[in-house]
Amino acid sequence: MASVRDAVKRVVEHVPQEETQEQKDQRFRNLYSTPPDFKEIAALDAEFATIVQGRDLDFKDPRAVMQLSKTLLKCDFGLALDLPDNRLCPPVCLELHRPHWHAWCLLTTNYILWLKDLLDSTTYDTPGRKLVGIDIGTGASCIYPMLGCTQRPWYFIASDIDDESLRWAQKNIEQNHLQTQIKLVRSKPGDPIIPIESAPATDDVAFVMTNPPFYKSAAEMDERAAAKSLPPLTACTGAPVEMVTDGGEVAFVGRILDQSLALRGRIQWYTAMLGFQSSVAALVLRLRHHDVGNYAVTEFVQGKKTKRWAVAWSFRGMRPCQSIARGVTTGSLKASLPAHTEVAVVDFPAFEAISRFASGVQGAVSSLETAHWEWDTQKLEGVLKVTEKVWTRAWRRQKQRRMDTGSETKDRRIKENLGFKIQINVNLDGVVVRCRWIEGHDESAFVSFTGYLKTTAKNVYSELETATESEAPAEK
């Protein structure tokens, strides 16, 4: 049989030696864009070949589900996975799993991909930096920390309350040589649910993640199973500790939320995967009750029918890009979505003087009193940082009043870091000026700035039209 070492060797041989972080991210993102071919997989892994035996995979067979996940982890991530028969096996590839009544088979890679985008879009730093994360309820597979460490230079605190799960998790960490990147922590029922004290004291904790038990009780699990019109199409090997928790997933994540209200900005993002759509609305309602306005909601589609959802929230000012913050198509969740972070400010019909137009917009913004303003003439985009609404008339009047009265005393007003990205998109249909809200808690500041940008862009465009008309040769 093919060994784990051979499988890992194949992975290494097919990865470019000088792969950049961007190339690496793209490779993982494209892994399961199409369903893997079972025959090709069987040719790569003899252990999987004994399960398939030239036919379709039997998803009702726990051995088949477990072996498929093991093989994909070996071939695509270079990871070895061992699990007991009575613990959850995390299916890796979405398209391989047909619709089923229970929610154990989360697309683990999707959660990690979304988490990477969430972190990348809420920093001014280059994506791919070293980060510390906390995985609550890591399970016997320790799958999220292992996948995260494979894709990024991350360090994990992985916690669980189940001794058997922790023993198997430690085995998986050791056989993948990840002891320096993943630290296991045993949690007790009365302990804080976020083991932040186990994190390195010198490092900033970037995120918390969890895929909690869905059900309030075994009875609820049975009731939901009985309510389904079809039997389960995929085998489940989960233990009660992995499937049931007092109060269900809303109560579980609610404990994280309660602790986050005390920790606040000590951790940048608190995130959770959810099995029920109703849980999203319930948690968003609690976030709004505590005036937490910086949050994100997304959905992960499994096959044709099954969906999972994720919610993230932060007490810091960095805002996610819109596809991450509002990644839901379900109409019933529209009321639960956070504020927009990207808007098309104004559009114009196609014209030739693009560089002059861009120069005019750039010049107008550079005249503001900014903490930082950087414009890329090639990409036609710039990043603006300010601590006040310096584009408003009210701010200019206050500044003039201080100058007139000679009042140069220290400004005692609370200032807030605000960040915006301006983009000028050119296509065959015309020119679109867009604005992305990067940083800040005050949505009205974003709305106000887009209003200023719209007026500025229109004024620059009008001046170009006037100049073009005056430059045109007079008719004889």
Image (cartoon, helix red, strand yellow):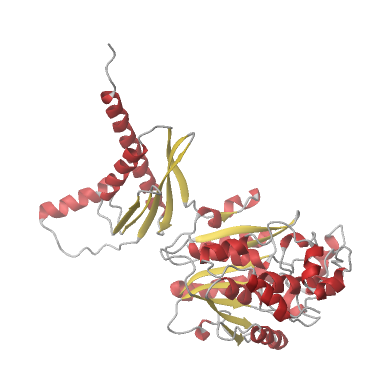
The location of residue 28, given as percent across then percent down, is 62, 64
Q: Nearer the viewer, residue 328 or 336?
A: 328
Q: Nearer the viewer, residue 403 or 310?
A: 310
Quarter of the image with the N terminus is: bottom right
Instruction: Please tell me whether residue 58 is drawn above or below residue 342 in the rendered image.
Output: below
Quarter of the image with the C terminus is: top left
Instruction: Please tell me whether residue 444 is drawn above or below residue 265 in the rendered image.
Output: above
The location of residue 127, given as percent across then percent down, is 47, 65
Q: Is residue 400 left or right of residue 81?
A: left
Total labels: the figure holds: 0
The location of residue 460, given as percent across then percent down, is 31, 36
Q: Quadrant of residue 159?
A: bottom right
Q: Is residue 324 left or right of residue 440?
A: right
Q: Is residue 161 left or right of residue 349?
A: right
Residue at image position (81%, 74%) is: 46
Which residue reaches farthest top? 476
Q: Nearer the viewer, residue 256 or 431?
A: 431
**Residue 253 appears in the rendering:** yes
Q: Quadrant of residue 410?
A: bottom left
Residue at image position (49%, 33%) is: 429
The location of residue 271, given as percent across then percent down, is 57, 68
**Residue 290 appears in the rendering:** no
